[in-house]
Image (spheres, rainbow, N blue to C red):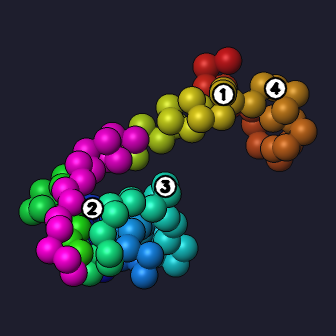
């Protein structure tokens, strides 16, 4: 496992040979970011972030090394509202908001 030096990201190596990226923004409930980072290594036995956290290196016991560009991850995390709206196909309309969030005042979250 390795911790990114400038953010709240962690990476772990699985026994399946893949690397898994974790968001530690909530230390009580860390969450996995996306699917496994399949690197086709026999085991992800060595993991290290670059000093700026933008690149992750994963190395296997066979000597192969895979470099991962993490800048897109930071980009998505910096625009979570836009990313969520795109993934969900838009926000809640007034009727849906009233049905699911009746205790809260309506907010146009995705520019409907």
Q: Which residue is under mark 1? A: 89
Q: Earlier in the sequence, mark 3 or mark 2?
A: 2
Q: Nearer the viewer, residue 94 or 28?
A: 28
Of label 3 and label 4, which has the lower sequence position? 3
Of the residues tagged 1 and 4, which is closer to the observer?
Answer: 1
Q: Which mark is residue 34?
A: 3
Tell me the quarter of the image containing the C terminus.
Answer: top right
Circle 2 packing at 10 Å, graded few (<14), some (14-19), many (20+), is: some
> Dot 4 lies on which element?
helix
Q: Secondary structure at mark 2?
A: loop
Q: Nearer the viewer, mark 2 or mark 1?
A: 1
Q: At 59% from the left edge and 35% from the top edge, which residue is drawn?
A: 87
The residue that mark 2 highlights is 7
What residue sits 36% from the left and 68% below the top? 19
Horizontal relation, residue 102 to residue 73: left or right: right
Q: Residue 32 lies in magenta, yes or no?
A: no
Residue 82 % position (x, y): 50, 31
Left or right, 103 with respect to 87, comes to right
| Residue 99 on image: x %, y % | 90, 39
Using the rendered view, name the quadrant where residue 100 is placed. top right
Circle 1 sits in a helix, a strand or a loop, which is it?
Answer: loop
Q: Secondary structure at mark 3?
A: loop
For marks 4 and 2, give the CA distance. Answer: 36 Å
Magenta span? 61-76
Q: Is residue 57 above or below residue 97?
A: below
Disc 3 and disc 1 in contact, CB within 8 angstroms? no
**Residue at horizontal 66 percent and vertical 27 percent from the top:** 89
Residue 107 vs residue 88, the one in the foreground: 88
Q: Which residue sits furthest left?
A: 51
For mark 4, what is the residue?
94
In magenta segment, residue 65: yes
């Amino acid at each position: 496992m390795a911790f990114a030096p400038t953010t709240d990201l962690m990476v772990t190596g699985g026994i399946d040979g893949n690397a898994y990226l974790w968001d530690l923004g909530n230390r009580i409930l860390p969450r996995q970011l996306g699917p496994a980072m399949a690197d086709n290594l026999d085991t992800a036995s060595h993991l290290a972030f670059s000093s700026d956290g933008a690149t992750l290196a994963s190395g296997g016991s066979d000597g192969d090394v895979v470099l991962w560009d993490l800048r897109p991850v930071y980009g998505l995390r910096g625009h979570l509202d836009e990313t969520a709206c795109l993934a969900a196909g838009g926000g809640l309309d007034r009727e849906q908001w009233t049905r699911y969030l009746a205790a809260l005042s309506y907010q146009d979250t995705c520019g409907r």
